[in-house]
Image (spheres, helix red, strand yellow):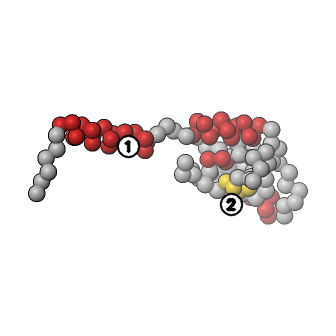
Amino acid sequence: MMESWSRREILAATIAVAAGLLAACGEDPLPALRARARNLGASLDCSDVAMLQPAEAATRADNQYRQHSERDDQFCLACLNYQPPADPAACGTCKTVRGPINPDGWCKQWTKARL
Protein backbone atom coordinates (compact mmCIF):
# COMPACT_ATOMS: atom_id res chain seq x y z
CA MET A 1 0.00 0.00 0.00
CA MET A 2 1.31 3.46 -0.96
CA GLU A 3 1.88 5.85 1.83
CA SER A 4 1.10 9.46 1.01
CA TRP A 5 3.49 12.19 2.01
CA SER A 6 2.51 15.62 3.17
CA ARG A 7 3.92 18.67 1.45
CA ARG A 8 6.00 19.32 4.54
CA GLU A 9 7.58 15.84 4.35
CA ILE A 10 8.30 16.22 0.64
CA LEU A 11 9.88 19.61 1.24
CA ALA A 12 12.02 18.26 4.12
CA ALA A 13 13.18 15.30 1.99
CA THR A 14 14.03 17.62 -0.92
CA ILE A 15 16.05 19.91 1.35
CA ALA A 16 17.90 16.93 2.82
CA VAL A 17 18.81 15.61 -0.63
CA ALA A 18 19.91 19.07 -1.82
CA ALA A 19 22.06 19.57 1.29
CA GLY A 20 23.67 16.18 0.72
CA LEU A 21 24.48 17.02 -2.88
CA LEU A 22 25.99 20.37 -1.91
CA ALA A 23 28.09 18.74 0.81
CA ALA A 24 29.30 16.10 -1.66
CA CYS A 25 30.40 18.79 -4.08
CA GLY A 26 32.16 20.82 -1.42
CA GLU A 27 34.81 23.40 -2.12
CA ASP A 28 37.68 22.82 -4.48
CA PRO A 29 40.61 21.65 -2.31
CA LEU A 30 43.20 22.55 -4.97
CA PRO A 31 43.83 26.22 -4.01
CA ALA A 32 44.50 25.32 -0.36
CA LEU A 33 46.71 22.41 -1.43
CA ARG A 34 48.57 24.70 -3.84
CA ALA A 35 49.26 27.18 -1.04
CA ARG A 36 50.47 24.34 1.19
CA ALA A 37 52.81 23.02 -1.53
CA ARG A 38 54.32 26.47 -2.07
CA ASN A 39 54.73 26.98 1.67
CA LEU A 40 56.37 23.58 2.23
CA GLY A 41 58.49 23.72 -0.90
CA ALA A 42 59.79 27.26 -0.53
CA SER A 43 62.43 26.34 2.04
CA LEU A 44 63.30 22.88 0.68
CA ASP A 45 66.27 22.14 -1.55
CA CYS A 46 65.50 18.79 -3.18
CA SER A 47 68.28 18.93 -5.77
CA ASP A 48 70.91 16.68 -4.15
CA VAL A 49 71.17 13.61 -6.37
CA ALA A 50 74.67 12.53 -5.29
CA MET A 51 73.36 9.22 -3.94
CA LEU A 52 71.67 8.28 -7.24
CA GLN A 53 73.05 6.05 -9.95
CA PRO A 54 73.40 7.77 -13.36
CA ALA A 55 70.31 6.02 -14.75
CA GLU A 56 68.28 7.09 -11.70
CA ALA A 57 69.47 10.68 -12.00
CA ALA A 58 68.53 10.62 -15.68
CA THR A 59 64.84 10.15 -14.74
CA ARG A 60 64.88 13.74 -13.51
CA ALA A 61 66.10 15.14 -16.83
CA ASP A 62 64.05 12.71 -18.94
CA ASN A 63 60.86 13.78 -17.13
CA GLN A 64 61.82 17.49 -17.07
CA TYR A 65 61.57 17.61 -13.26
CA ARG A 66 61.55 21.10 -11.74
CA GLN A 67 61.67 21.92 -8.02
CA HIS A 68 59.02 24.62 -8.39
CA SER A 69 56.00 24.45 -10.66
CA GLU A 70 54.74 27.50 -12.51
CA ARG A 71 51.35 25.82 -12.87
CA ASP A 72 48.63 26.42 -10.29
CA ASP A 73 46.87 23.14 -11.12
CA GLN A 74 49.87 20.81 -11.47
CA PHE A 75 52.42 20.34 -8.69
CA CYS A 76 53.89 17.30 -6.94
CA LEU A 77 51.79 17.51 -3.76
CA ALA A 78 48.68 17.05 -5.96
CA CYS A 79 50.23 14.24 -8.04
CA LEU A 80 49.29 10.58 -7.83
CA ASN A 81 52.97 9.61 -8.06
CA TYR A 82 54.17 11.79 -5.17
CA GLN A 83 55.06 10.03 -1.92
CA PRO A 84 55.02 12.50 1.00
CA PRO A 85 57.69 12.19 3.67
CA ALA A 86 56.98 11.37 7.32
CA ASP A 87 58.44 14.76 8.23
CA PRO A 88 56.72 17.62 6.34
CA ALA A 89 59.96 19.61 6.51
CA ALA A 90 61.71 17.03 4.29
CA CYS A 91 61.63 16.23 0.58
CA GLY A 92 59.27 13.53 -0.61
CA THR A 93 59.80 10.84 -3.21
CA CYS A 94 58.13 9.87 -6.48
CA LYS A 95 57.13 6.66 -8.21
CA THR A 96 58.51 7.83 -11.58
CA VAL A 97 61.27 10.37 -10.84
CA ARG A 98 64.14 9.25 -8.61
CA GLY A 99 65.71 11.26 -5.81
CA PRO A 100 64.31 13.88 -3.45
CA ILE A 101 61.14 15.56 -4.67
CA ASN A 102 59.85 19.00 -3.71
CA PRO A 103 56.08 19.12 -2.97
CA ASP A 104 56.00 22.30 -5.09
CA GLY A 105 57.76 20.54 -7.98
CA TRP A 106 56.51 19.33 -11.35
CA CYS A 107 57.47 16.89 -14.10
CA LYS A 108 55.89 15.74 -17.34
CA GLN A 109 54.71 12.51 -15.64
CA TRP A 110 52.35 14.56 -13.45
CA THR A 111 49.08 12.69 -12.89
CA LYS A 112 46.17 14.21 -11.01
CA ALA A 113 45.63 12.62 -7.60
CA ARG A 114 42.17 12.06 -6.23
CA LEU A 115 41.67 14.90 -3.80
Report the amino acid beneath label 1: Gly
Say if mark 1 contacts mark 2, CB within 8 Å.
no
Q: Nearest the camera: 32 or 1?
A: 1
Q: Nearest the camera: 53 or 101?
A: 101
Q: Residue at x 79, y 45 (%)?
A: 89
Q: Residue furthest left?
A: 1
In the figure, is residue 29 to the left or right of 88?
left
31 shown above or below 61: above
- Name the mark on residue 20: 1
Q: Is residue 66 visible?
A: no
Give percent across and percent down for residue 24.
43, 44
Secondary structure under badge 1?
Answer: helix
Tell me the residue that label 2 is attached to.
95
Q: Residue at x 75, y 46 (%)?
A: 88
Quarter of the image with the N terminus is bottom left
Q: Residue at x 67, y 54 (%)?
A: 82
Q: CA distance from mark 1 to mark 2?
A: 36 Å
Give percent across and percent down for residue 91.
78, 49
Give percent across and percent down for residue 111.
59, 53
Report the amino acid beneath label 2: Lys
